[in-house]
Amino acid sequence: MKKYSVVLVVLALALMLSTQAIAKDALTVWVGGHVVEQEGTWAEIIKDFEKTTGIKVEYQLIGFDVYYDKLVTAFKAGQGPDVSFADLGGWVPTFAAQGWLEPMEEQLQAASVTEQIWSNLWPTVTYDGVRYGLPWYTDCRVLLYNKTMFEEAGLDPDNPPVTWDEMLDVALKLTDAKSMKYGYGVSGKKSEVATLGYMIFLHGAGGELLTEDYSKAAFNTPEGLSALKFYTELYTKHKVSPPATPSYGEDDYRSMMAQNRIAMAIGGPWSFPLIELANPAIKGNYTVALHPYSKEPASVLGGWASVIAKTCENKDAAWQFVDFITGYDVWMNWVERHGGPMPTRMDVCNAVPEFKDPKWQVILDAFPHAKVRPPIPEWPQVSDRIQNMVQTVITGKVSAEEAIATAEAQINEILGAK
């Protein structure tokens, strides 16, 4: 009996070690951002990659709100995924400065995909002159609006507001609090979307967030203050944004727009498949326009890049995956199925018939006006202070003047400005 017990123990240990070896050999991949909702498409892409290469992949699709904290915690513990998505808003240089990422310069110089990437995206994945990521999709933020709600309010959906004053006038006409319908969704939650919202208004007022060399805050100006006041007063003074605005962001407003409860909000090309996923009946009843501005057209560039962890034990396999998902055929299939987001590949953008849609023409027209979030390691801290600034004004804790001065001082301290 003891003999059989020993045999069973040995077999159990062998099975456990075998399972651990398989898990260790598998490539771990974390995907974050708005594209995580296309679960079926990701399953097909992973399956196709495994079949083509023979490389096993274990992947997770993680929501935006929790993704950054989860990823940073894993990297700090030395247990980051082999391949992950990093926001083009300063994550790549931040992670590279911490020593968490593997340089991609050698692979990018030899890869055919490199020449197809929009050139203005490379600074977002560069640290100390070295590229640490391959941009996967990009976007620029514009005004997303509900045509049906415009028509119900007696407004022309083909004539969206162009200026701030026009936007406020339209938003007031679209707001009916008793029916829980609101004209404009202000991103007030403490997350990156609050920073992005403020930046669109800031640049639209002719202001800048940081100095040209990224060494000092540049937003505590008449332009920066007017942007903060107008943005927050849409909620605090004019009440055209819902009561829960301090806890709402772009995703919330997109879902509400799909149900005809929010008329206007900040959105982008990722919004197209997601708003239709939330309510298929909304198709054809929403569109986009350049976001209203005070002095000049403005947008903020966004998107995600694939990065490889320094701790990855099979970097060749990791690069194969990164290269595969950025492939022409993968992207053509993705856009055909979902209509967006915007690929970082110029050849795909020029080839897909879906981009002849008027909504996509707005995106492509807005792209030249899109500002890049400063590609500096300190960006997460800088963004956090901007989020605090917006939150404290939105919730009535301090005045806009106090909040902007505090944020300026904090950011200058972070950047070591003198």
Image (cartoon, rainbow, N blue to C red):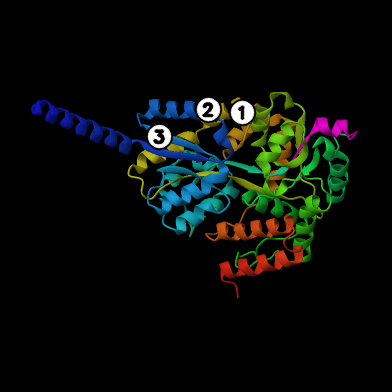
- Residue span colored magenta: 143-155
The type of residue carrying mark 3 is: Glu
In this image, 262 relative to 339: left or right? right
**Percent of width and height locating residue 248:** 68, 45
Q: Is residue 132 above or below residue 216?
A: above
Residue count near mark 2 (Cα–Cα under 10 Å), binned few <14, some 14–19, many ≥20: some
Residue 232 marker: none
Image quadrant assignment for residue 314: top left
Q: Which mark is residue 41?
A: 2
Q: Does residue 73 lie above or below 273 as drawn? A: below
**Which residue occupies the foreground of this view, 1 or 303?**
1
Which residue occupies the extreme right position in the image?
A: 154
Instruction: Find the distance from the CA under tag 3 to the CA under tag 2.
Output: 15 Å
Q: Amino acid at mark 2?
A: Thr
**What's the mark number on residue 58?**
3
Q: Earlier in the sequence, mark 1 or mark 3?
A: 3
Residue at the image point whose x is 80% and y is 50% from the top: 234
In the depicted view, which residue is nearer to us: 186 or 374?
186
Label 3: which secondary element: strand
Estimate the x, y position of residue 230 in percent, counting from the top left.
80, 55
Task: Give the labeled residue for mark 1.
Answer: 338
Q: Are marks 2 and 1 in contact (CB under 8 Å)?
A: yes
